[in-house]
Amino acid sequence: MASPFSIKSLSSANNSTFFLVLVLISLCLKLAEAQAKLCRTSCGGIPINYPFGIDDGCGSPYYRHILVCSNSGQLELRTPSGRYPVTNISYADPHILVKDPFMWNCQDRDNFRPTRPFSLDTSTHLRLSSQNDYLFFNCSEYDVIIEPKPMFCERFPEQCDSTCDSASYLCRHLPECAYALSQSSCCSYYPKATESLRMMLKYCKTYTSVYWRNLGITPGYNQIPEYGIRVDYEIPVTIHCLQCEDNVKGGGTCGFDTESQNFLCLCKKGNVTTYCQDQNVQHNRPGAVAGTVTAVSVAGAFGIGAGVWYLRKLRAKAPVTHGVQSNENRLF
Ligand SMILES: *[C@@H]1O[C@H](CO)[C@@H](O)[C@H](O)[C@H]1NC(C)=O
Ligand SMILES: *[C@@H]1O[C@H](CO)[C@@H](O)[C@H](O)[C@H]1NC(C)=O
Ligand SMILES: *[C@@H]1O[C@H](CO)[C@@H](O)[C@H](O)[C@H]1NC(C)=O
């Protein structure tokens, strides 16, 4: 008689254990979900990693409010001249690719639409890449020095800053539509600053930007031109962030306090100023400022391949003429 009863009670005990496990699992899932919601890791199929964030408090404060994930799931770059659709972000060779819908494209042919110069906030850690080529169409020959550049200038553009090259490879082979222009003139120009784009556009009807996309592992050999703007960025390397994201130390997400902008390691159990599995965590301690260290010392200290860390490119300061003629650079 006793056996059916004991079986019943045993099975009910099993049921409640099972229920408890279910509750625990769903709690864990909720936690993971909350963490996932705290810092989304992609937008429109484009991965969002450190130093970027599309949720406030995620990533590095250097790039706060720079990327926006629109309601329709389109990643956009915010600059003083507008919001531009981002087509890709590379973290290994740090750059963002954006499209400017106001720039000339193949469908426009000789019918130019009003355009606006692309600009970047110079106070941010974003730079127009030197791998962009800009093609200007129907420029005023009085205001812009337009002439074919010798080979010398192709190799050392900074020394031939002020001329717009009417015989450039790209003008003769417009990507995707080699013969789209029949009546309009084309010249290419390497701007020193976004300011140059604004100056040039005063004297040209429209323009477009072409970047060289690396196809293979051997840079320089497998590159194809594509319409778009390449924007280079720097990855601020901090010991705090390296420790925070270290899986052995708890695998957190680098973020910052939205009020003080001090570093925070975002962990499942809450935010800390060190790393998720730090034994001496004091949650209410004011955040220590994450010092920016040089790439070299971090690579040395942590044995990380130096190639991943980006150092700001140092370029010779040539006189900036913005491509437009002035009394100093007038050739005739
Ligand atoms: C985006 O960039 C990554 C890394 O550079 C590359 O592997 C991927 O093919 C790119 N995606 C597109 C759509 O260009
Ligand atoms: C560009 O200039 C050429 C020659 O001056 C002219 O025929 C053409 O209509 C211009 N195109 C546009 C779109 O302004
Ligand atoms: C952790 O930081 C994020 C971003 O600053 C904030 O939204 C969130 O409320 C914080 N969570 C806790 C538990 O402090």
Image (spheres, rainbow, N blue to C red):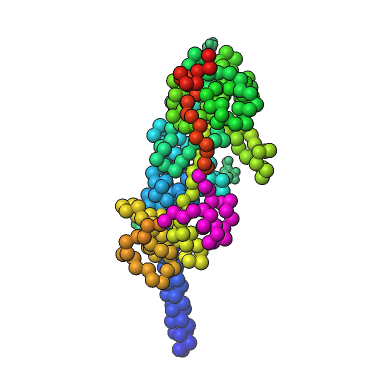
Question: What's the residue at 43%, 49% (across, down)?
Answer: 53
| Image location of residue 54, percent across then percent down | 42, 47
- View quadrant of ligand 1: top right
Is residue 306 inside the magenta stretch? Answer: yes
| Image location of residue 169, percent across then percent down | 64, 25
Residue sitting nearer the eye, 56 or 297:
297
Provide the residue span drawn in magenta. Answer: 291-312
Question: What's the residue at 47%, 65% (across, down)?
Answer: 250
Residue sitting nearer the eye, 311 or 332:
332
Is residue 77 inside the magenta stretch? Answer: no
Question: What's the residue at 35%, 52% (across, down)?
Answer: 261
Task: Decide if residue 12 is on the left or right side of residue 180.
Answer: left
Residue sitting nearer the eye, 1 or 133:
133
**Taking 200 as reference, is 66 above or below it?**
below
Q: Residue lying furthest front in this view?
A: 328
Q: Residue lying furthest bottom in this view?
A: 1
Question: What's the residue at 51%, 32% (across, down)?
Answer: 318
Residue 206 visible to the viewer: no
| Image location of residue 96, percent across then percent down | 51, 41
**Taking 177 as reference, is 308 above or below it?**
below
Task: Decide if residue 281 is on the left or right side of residue 14.
Answer: left
Residue 21 visible to the viewer: yes
Question: Residue 212 sits in which quadrant?
Answer: top right
| Image location of residue 49, percent across then percent down | 49, 51
**Taking 178 as reference, is 309 above or below it?**
below
